[in-house]
Image (cartoon, coloured by chain):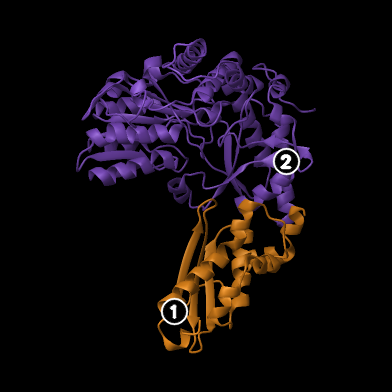
Chain colours: A purple, B orange
């Protein structure tokens, strides 16, 4: 293959060989997968970890004293340790959940319903994914609280003046994304958490688009709650993590009641298990938690600094290549250092869905639509955008294929 | 079928120059729906005459070429037809208007949004006027 990304970070050809799905054809063309912000593909090591669990030591965890039960428990907890360490957190502060959405909803129910009172202020931002807006709308409605939003600057950053203004109203909660799934904007989570904490707020950070793409150190960020999804970081679907400060987790009510989460059950009441088990009711998603551990190992071996370096190069190349396309508008910050490896754009009057259909015919998979960020779409004053998002296996060739597909759409639509 | 066949001249023409695009000053039916997957949006307004016919119909909306073209084509077809005709419309009629493109399951929803808006509006109107003698046979 010509024009492949030559990078000191890692050998992309070698990385590509680890992902069996990349061998498949779509409409007879090489699969060019650029929908990584929606979900990433899985390396063989992750697939193997799932198969290994089911074919060698499938068993329930934290209950059975037989060999399989011990092995499954050890693997599940080892995965928790690796995942927590990966983001600079403590294993006891890592709650396995289905994904980022379940994590924010867990905070909404278990923390919010207990601590939010009538008249309290909750703060989110206009660049959030719906999973970091709707739970707070529901919480505001059930507790009689108010929800307000941090505004955006024209170049796609959070408006710090707007944040400061809201912080003067002493919000109880500040929920924001570490990295926008549309603009790519990387927010200064450390600074925002510090400001929010100084104003007395609890912070909830959506890390769904940050943990998969660049090094994250929760010890320095200091967020009260930090959520991310396994399937966007080479892991399986149905598994994610809520990192929460131990004091807060201990003080919270349970999320779901049932097995595993209890210590003792009586006729009229129960007592709760220690954190994080208090929040892991019922039989947990053992296989996918173990799969996520394998994904973390894979990313750790590549090195998250290298992953970031690789994506910045792809981003620079993509913006360079796409800047030559007449009628194409890219959203988000100009400076690649301030954004992650994705490009959201619109092309002339070709609707993103029409563009995605034409690109699909070329084997190129992108996302088109509102990206679960309708407040942001309204800020941009567009009904939808197209989005190409990168990960470790993408190359310059993929971006060239994207451009060729866009040019084809231009020819069909007579742009 | 290739995308060049889906996006034929006709569809692009309806996308860029939609017929019956706009709002009515006086209308009896106002129907609106969105496609939550894409954010495609269609609103239709219909004025009904004394014989329960679609006297005037207009639509507004935003979205992909397929959703906007199919809605526009459908308004052209519906104009002058009895309201009861709307009950007979099936998705194959819409596909035919579009030239029977080979659409995947997610894009089919784009194509059928206009039909859904038309049917929802007309069914609601027929339901609300069900007790009137003229409608007894229906």
Q: Residue at x 46, y 48 (%)?
A: A374
Marks 1/2 in contact by CB < 8 Å: the verdict is no
**Chain on which label 2 sits:** A
In which quadrant of the rendered view does residue A257 lie? top left
Residue A354: x %, y % from top left: 65, 53
Residue B13: x %, y % from top left: 68, 66
Q: Residue at x 73, y 46 (%)?
A: A361
Quarter of the image with the C terminus of chain A is bottom right
Q: Is residue B20 visible from the viewing direction of this image? A: no
Between A388 and B47, which is closer to the camera in this rendering? B47
- The numbered disc on residue B110 is none
Placement of A238 over or under B30, stated as above or below: above
**Chain on which label 1 sits:** B
**Mark 1 crowdedness (10 Å alpha carbons): few <14, some 14-19, many ≥20:** some
In which quadrant of the rendered view does residue B115 lie? bottom right
Q: Secondary structure at mark 1?
A: loop
Between A82 and A171, which is closer to the camera in this rendering? A82
Which residue has dot 1 on it? Answer: B28
A212 displayed left or right of B3: left
Q: Secondary structure at mark 2?
A: loop
């Amino acid at each position: 293959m010509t024009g492949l990304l030559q990078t000191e970070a890692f050998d992309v050809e070698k990385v590509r060989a680890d992902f069996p799905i990349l061998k498949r054809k779509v409409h007879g063309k090489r699969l060019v997968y650029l929908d990584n912000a929606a979900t990433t593909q899985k390396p063989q090591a992750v697939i193997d970890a799932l198969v290994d669990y089911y074919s060698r030591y499938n068993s329930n965890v934290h209950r059975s004293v037989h060999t399989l039960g011990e092995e499954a428990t050890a693997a599940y907890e080892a995965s928790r340790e690796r995942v927590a360490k990966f983001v600079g957190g403590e294993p006891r502060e890592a709650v396995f959940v289905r994904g980022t959405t379940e994590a924010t909803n867990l905070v909404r129910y278990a923390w919010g319903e207990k601590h939010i009172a009538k008249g309290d202020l909750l703060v989110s931002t206009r660049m959030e994914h719906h999973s970091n807006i709707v739970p707070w709308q529901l919480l505001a409605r059930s507790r009689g609280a108010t929800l307000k939003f941090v505004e955006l600057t024209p170049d796609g950053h959070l408006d710090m003046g707007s944040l400061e203004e809201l912080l003067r109203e002493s919000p109880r909660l500040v929920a924001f994304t570490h990295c926008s799934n549309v603009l790519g904007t990387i927010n200064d989570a450390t600074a925002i958490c510090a400001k929010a904490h100084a104003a007395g707020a609890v912070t909830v950070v959506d890390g769904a688009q940050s943990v998969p793409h660049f090094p994250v150190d929760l010890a320095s960020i200091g967020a009260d709650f930090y959520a991310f999804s396994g399937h966007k970081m080479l892991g399986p679907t149905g598994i994610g993590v809520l990192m929460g400060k131990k004091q807060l987790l201990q003080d919270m009510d349970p999320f779901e009641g049932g097995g595993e989460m209890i210590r003792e059950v009586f006729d009229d009441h129960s007592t709760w298990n220690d954190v994080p088990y208090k929040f892991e009711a019922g039989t947990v998603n053992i296989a996918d938690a173990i799969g996520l551990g394998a994904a973390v190992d894979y990313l750790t071996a590549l090195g998250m600094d290298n992953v970031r370096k690789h994506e910045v190069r792809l981003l620079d190349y993509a913006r360079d290549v796409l800047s030559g396309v007449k009628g194409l508008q890219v959203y988000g910050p100009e400076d690649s250092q301030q954004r992650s490896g994705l490009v959201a754009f619109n092309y002339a009057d070709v609707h993103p869905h029409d563009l995605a259909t034409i690109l699909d015919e070329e084997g190129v998979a992108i996302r088109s639509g509102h990206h679960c960020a309708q407040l942001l779409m309204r800020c941009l004053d567009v009904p939808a955008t197209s989005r190409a998002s990168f990960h470790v296996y993408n190359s310059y060739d993929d971006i060239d294929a994207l451009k060729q597909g866009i040019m084809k759409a231009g020819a069909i639509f007579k742009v | 079928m290739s995308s060049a066949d889906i996006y034929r001249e006709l569809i692009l023409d309806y996308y860029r120059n939609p017929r019956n695009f706009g709002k009515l000053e006086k209308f009896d039916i106002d129907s609106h729906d969105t496609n939550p997957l894409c954010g495609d949006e269609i609103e239709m307004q219909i004025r009904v005459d004394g014989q329960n016919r679609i006297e005037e119909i207009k639509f507004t909306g935003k979205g992909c070429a397929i959703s906007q073209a199919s809605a526009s084509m459908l308004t052209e077809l519906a104009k002058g037809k009895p309201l009861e005709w709307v009950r007979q419309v099936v998705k194959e009629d819409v596909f035919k208007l579009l030239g029977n493109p080979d659409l995947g399951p997610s894009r089919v929803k784009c194509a059928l949004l206009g039909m859904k808006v038309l049917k929802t509006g007309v069914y609601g109107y027929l339901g609300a006027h069900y007790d009137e003698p003229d409608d007894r046979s229906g």
